[in-house]
Image (cartoon, rainbow, N blue to C red):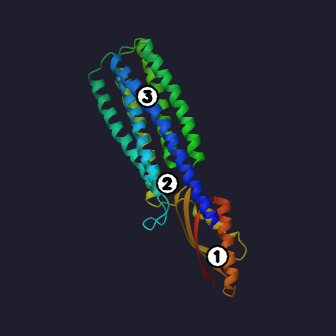
């Protein structure tokens, strides 16, 4: 009971830390987005404006993440005996949907710019703002990704991948600005904007896929790996009906083990604990395990 209480306290602490990380990242994302949209509007650059909207979606995604983490951090209750962890996964899914909407808007604007290209006005200020935002985005990716893996947070990891695509997009915009300065036709701006929308669609798809796997209870671990661990325990004669689901920090496993029919209840109970201990040693302490014991014939 004391161990379970310690686990719950650790999860709440990690959730609070993850929320603080999201607040910091959100402020940086909105600041970057505002600068990009303003400079893009002044210079009449569709690619910079598209990049600005992408950064704006980053900040909006942070808000979704903060709300989701706040709910996910609630303790177990009668209505949610397995906890509220999936609310964090739902937040990741909403970030993916938000990204899809932004990608659609950027793609539509890009096609219009290709059909009716406008000549952007590229200035030293434009370069300075884009390079500064690129540096900020690189910092955000490293900071958020490190904290996400450290705190086992789906939202932080998903959001860092989102921002990683922002780094590539901003780099592409800077290359476009250089090409325009060297006399390339204005249509290049619309083409790069369209490529940017492709990156955003890709990020949306990856987040949506990862989140839907958790919500649909897809296998969290390989059945073969679980089987090998269980069969390595002396006294287990066979194992079947292996299932797993959940997130990396909240995995649930249930399985059946077959033992000698003459084994005492006391010994079979001890063996059950041994199997559970071996699984936790292999896959992590945060695993919930249900083992059904059957006689081997």
Q: Residue at x 46, y 17 (%)?
A: 127
Q: Give the crowd class for mark 2: few <14, some 14-19, many >=20 residues within 10 Å.
A: many
Expressed as whole percent of the image width and height from the top left, the position of residue 237 reads 67, 77
| Mark 3 element type | helix
| Mark 1 element type | strand
Label 2 close to label 1 by CB (< 8 Å): no
Expressed as whole percent of the image width and height from the top left, the position of residue 60 reads 39, 39
Q: Disc 2 vs disc 1: which is toward the camera? A: 2
Query: According to the image, label 2 marks what residue?
Result: 73
Q: CA distance from mark 2 to mark 3?
A: 28 Å
Please, is residue 241 above or below residue 99 in the view? below
Q: Residue at x 29, y 20 (%)?
A: 117
Relative placement, left or right, of 171 versus 52 is: right
Q: Quadrant of residue 185?
A: top left
- Comparing 102 with 57, the one in front is 57
- Residue 152 visible somewhere in the drawing: no
Please, is residue 226 above or below residue 123 in the view? below
Query: According to the image, label 3 marks what residue?
Result: 31
Q: CA distance from mark 1 to mark 3?
A: 59 Å
Expressed as whole percent of the image width and height from the top left, the position of residue 91 reads 42, 49
């Amino acid at each position: 009971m004391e161990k379970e209480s310690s686990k719950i306290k650790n999860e709440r602490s990690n959730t609070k830390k993850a929320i603080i990380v999201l607040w910091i990242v959100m402020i940086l994302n909105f600041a970057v987005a505002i600068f990009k949209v303003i400079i893009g509007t002044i210079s009449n650059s569709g690619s910079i404006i598209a990049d600005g909207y992408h950064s704006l979606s980053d900040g909006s995604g942070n808000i979704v993440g903060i709300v989701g983490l706040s709910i996910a951090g609630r303790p177990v209750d009668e209505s949610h005996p397995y906890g509220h962890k999936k609310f964090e996964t739902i937040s990741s899914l909403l970030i993916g949907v938000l990204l899809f909407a932004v990608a659609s808007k950027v793609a539509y604007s890009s096609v219009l710019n290709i059909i009716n290209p406008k000549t952007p006005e590229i200035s030293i200020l434009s370069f300075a703002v884009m390079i500064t935002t690129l540096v900020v985005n690189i910092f955000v990716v490293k900071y958020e990704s490190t904290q996400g893996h450290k705190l086992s947070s789906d939202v932080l990891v998903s959001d860092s991948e989102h921002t990683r695509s922002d780094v590539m997009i901003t780099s592409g915009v800077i290359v476009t600005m250089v090409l325009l300065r060297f006399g390339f036709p204005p249509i290049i701006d619309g083409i790069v904007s369209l490529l940017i929308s492709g990156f955003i669609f890709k990020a949306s798809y990856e987040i949506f896929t990862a989140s839907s796997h958790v919500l649909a209870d897809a296998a969290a671990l390989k059945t073969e790996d679980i089987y090998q661990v269980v069969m390595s325990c002396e006294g287990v004669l066979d194992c079947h009906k292996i299932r797993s689901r959940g997130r990396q920090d909240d995995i649930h496993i249930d399985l059946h083990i077959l033992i000698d029919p003459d084994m005492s209840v006391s010994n079979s109970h001890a063996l059950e604990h041994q199997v559970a201990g071996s699984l936790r040693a292999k896959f992590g302490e945060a695993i919930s395990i249900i083992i059904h014991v059957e006689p081997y014939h």
